[in-house]
Amino acid sequence: MTDLAGLSGLEAELRGVVRGEVGFDVTARALVTMDASNYRRVPAGVVAPRDAEDVAAVLEVCRARGVPVVARGGGTSIAGQATGTGVVLDFTRHMNGLLELDPSTRTAVVQPGLVLDRLQEAAAPHGLRFGPDPATHSRCTLGGMIGNNSCGSHSVAWGTTADSVRELSVITARGQRLRLGQGWAGAPDGLRDLVEGDLARLRTGFPDLPRRISGYALDALLPEKGADVARSFCGSEGTLGILTEAVVRLVEAPRARALTVLAYGDESAAAEAAAGLLPHGPLTVEGMAADLVRSPAGLPKGGAWLFVETGGQTPAEARARAETIVRAADVVDSLVVTDAAAQRSLWRIREDASGTATRMPDGSEAWPGWEDCAVPPARLGPYLRDFRALLTAHGLRGTPYGHFGDGCIHVRIDFDLLTAAGVGRFRRFSEELADLVVAHGGSLSGEHGDGQARAELLPRMYGAETVRLFERAKAVWDPDDLLNPGMLVRPAPLDTNLRFSVLPHRPVDVAFGYPADDGDFRAAVRRCVGVAKCRTTTAAGPAVMCPSFRATGEEEHSTRGRARLLHEMLAGELVTDGWRSTEVRDALDLCLSCKGCRSDCPVGVDMATYKAEFLHHHYEGQRRPAAHYTMGRLPLWLRWVARTHTAPLLNRLASVRLLARVGKRLGGIAPEREIPRVAPETFSHWWRRRKRRTVGDPIVLWPDTFTEHLSPSVGEAAVRVLEAAGLRPVPPPSRPLGGGVCCGLTYVSTGQLDRARAVLRRTLDLMEPVLRRGTPVVVLEPSCAAALRGDLPELLHDDPRAARLASAVLTFAEALERHAPDWTPPAVNRPVAGQTHCHQHAILGDTADRGLRESAGLTGELSGGCCGLAGNFGFEQGHFEVSRACAEEQLLPSVRDASEGTVILADGFSCRTQLEQLAGVRGRHLAEVLAEGLEDESREVK
């Protein structure tokens, strides 16, 4: 094994010959220790090549030093093949282009780092698409798809990636540049002799099934199959050569599609039915059972479903084909959907299964390892029954789903990979399941490749002689075993290099309760399994995650990248200074704490909470950044301003440019920002001097810091609307000198968790009478409502009052929906634009808001994403550019494109401030819009 510790000159030598980035620092290496598998390897360094010349230079240096080279795309591989101990080539940074698209020949020339969705977007205007489409289509790369011979849901119609490859440009480990194609084009010396010397084995030793991905596709080199070297290269997992360019085939996309969801009593019934639908020419036949569905909303009633897509030149033709399939299927219930938005919503249920499956229904962890084996479609029903029986025999649980029409099953199993006994059971089960798959005529891998997870078991599928043939083929391409060693041939054992083995054996001391992870921060960090939905380059629909990655494109600013660094922090091998790590701190610095990952990540990673936890420990006993003292303790300073009646003076001082510049520098505030004006009269003071309503159901109206001191007009408007709806808003209890209630948000977001706990305990003491009476609590600021509903019970998990207050919290719209259901809001009848608050999206939900807007005649959809200000984030020094980039993604364009008379809605103070400072636009809280509507109606009556 290469002694990588002694390669001190490797980095310098690579920097001397490579024009792309060379990263041997802790962060660069930590980000690629894992893919989406159970495995972990620590590389020597990472290189982001700019072009093929860089790739050749890296190979030359590494060959001379005997250092392995691993090609990596999106890092979503599930068998461990995107990890390695040598130099990792990251193609996503520079070699990610679409070089040519020719509609006449239906071909495209792509670089290996091109994300599949970018190719689809470019092909769509020509009525074309790339056939294979894995569930990770928004972040997987063409190079990774070719390396794994990926498939996706449309493989029953358009096959695997190998079926869509025309030519491949490859550099071998010894620097030979080859152009692979049919008729032995580009074959390295010795390959043809190897094949022609063993034709009988190649003709009889490979299972004939649509999803046979395991091993090398040497049978593609048979003369009767065109001696297709490019096709044979597909699925080689970076072990034969490094791909630098590919010519791929495109297919005609149906002009119209219909999605049929067929409901069955159970999974076996759905599996038995799948093969019978294939003669009707569907585009997809996908299957999943009820135990993978978080909410069955929108699905026909049943215990399992087949998602069957049909196409046509017209919607009527697509629907007619769908109805033919319904008539041919013996189902419990069915649903045919032709609306594109509704189809996307249903497909999202299926695509999120890759993350949802990582948790069992009871919340326990489940892992890949037997993620995608495949059998002949006609054998799927019997195979699934035998598979379930084997799970039961080993005391394991799993939730199968996948490409039923191709006989390919995905499953995550609740292996115990943390103890020696559990790992032993993992091995025994894997061996027995391999035998079961082979007995059904199947392939150990049906989509994701063998990697380390299954390569050791290939002799059970192919026999020892064929595996030796694989080894000889590897030696022809890569005689020095430089490329991705330990994969496919001479593999590492399937139960070594497990990523969990390096974690601490005992829980670490933490502040938050992590109720979904039994209070274990290690389990919380393990939630990230690497499916990388956070790496999408556009936010789809209302989604938020991950705005900082979309702004910078850097892995360390993705939710996955940050989770990887936290994992390495706990492991202590690469990141050696624990909670004091500057690498983790710097990666978390651009986390907006938007909480988008909490809802958008399929496994519910909550990076905002992890960030607060880290900052709490990192700065314990240390001097904090200035912004933590200014903006982190904002409620304290604003209460002091209110008590001393100095708001007018403060505003005048802030308007003096020189004083403002000095103040911002001392306070850690970005110089590009304007300091918001403090209201001359607080919301509570206005409320005290106003005659209050004395009838109606009482409802506590929470005076959050932003409404109280910076935007009291929102509170005033809410009082008027709630009273008009027949409710009686009342203030929460307070102490004249001890302060009022506070959600602790600013303390939590800056990791001042001891202060946050003290503030929240004082709040709970004050709210005791309210909690005893069970009075609802309305919170106007979405971030404060989210803090009370989410952070409060997790931070004070030992105080039962915390959960009671959290359950009492309502948004403004929820309060009207639940406690004034018969009230009719004023008819505003205007279009709206703006953005749903990221915390509302992630924690609170906006169903009630949508209903209230509809009742008031406020039409149109609000955009997704994050405004980019995100509380203190956008005000902190060094964050302005990222903050602005986040706003420019969706919020600002939606406002600029709005027609005259459009209402700009922004319930969050941060969102309104961002709009005002970057676009000169005044955003309004929904309460303000309705209050204005009430005034207009009153004037009309008069």
Image (cartoon, helix red, strand yellow):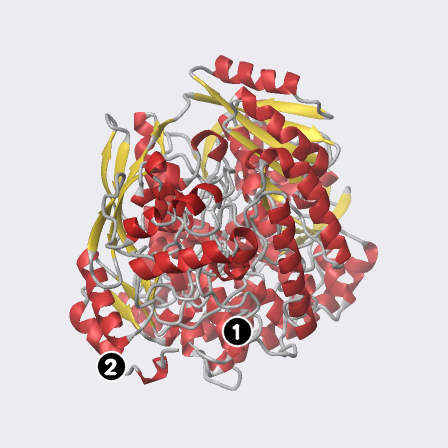
How many marks do you count on the picture? Answer: 2
Q: Nearer the viewer, residue 540 or 309?
A: 309
Quarter of the image for residue 511 reads: bottom right
In space, the residues marked 1 and 2 are separated at their CA atoms by 34 Å
Q: Is residue 896 above or below residue 598?
A: above
**In terms of secondary structure, where does tag 1 sit?**
helix
User: Residue at point 44% right, 41% down?
Assistant: 203
User: Residue at point 58% right, 61% down?
Assistant: 527
User: Residue at point 35% right, 36% down?
Assistant: 225
Question: Callout 2, which amino acid?
Answer: Gly
Question: Callout 1, which amino acid?
Answer: Phe
Q: Quadrant of the N terminus?
A: bottom left
Image spot of residue 855 (x, y percent)? 61, 29
Q: Is residue 575 above or below residue 398?
A: below
**In terms of secondary structure, where does tag 2 sit?**
loop
User: Residue at point 51% right, 33% down?
Assistant: 344
Marks 1 and 2 close (CB-CB < 8 Å): no
Label at residue 9: 2
Q: Quadrant of the C terminus?
A: top right
| Mark 1 burial class by Cα count in 10 Å: few <14, some 14-19, many 20+ | many
Image spot of residue 331 (x, y percent)? 71, 25
Label at residue 659: none
| Mark 2 burial class by Cα count in 10 Å: few <14, some 14-19, many 20+ | few
Q: Is residue 551 above or below residue 203?
A: below
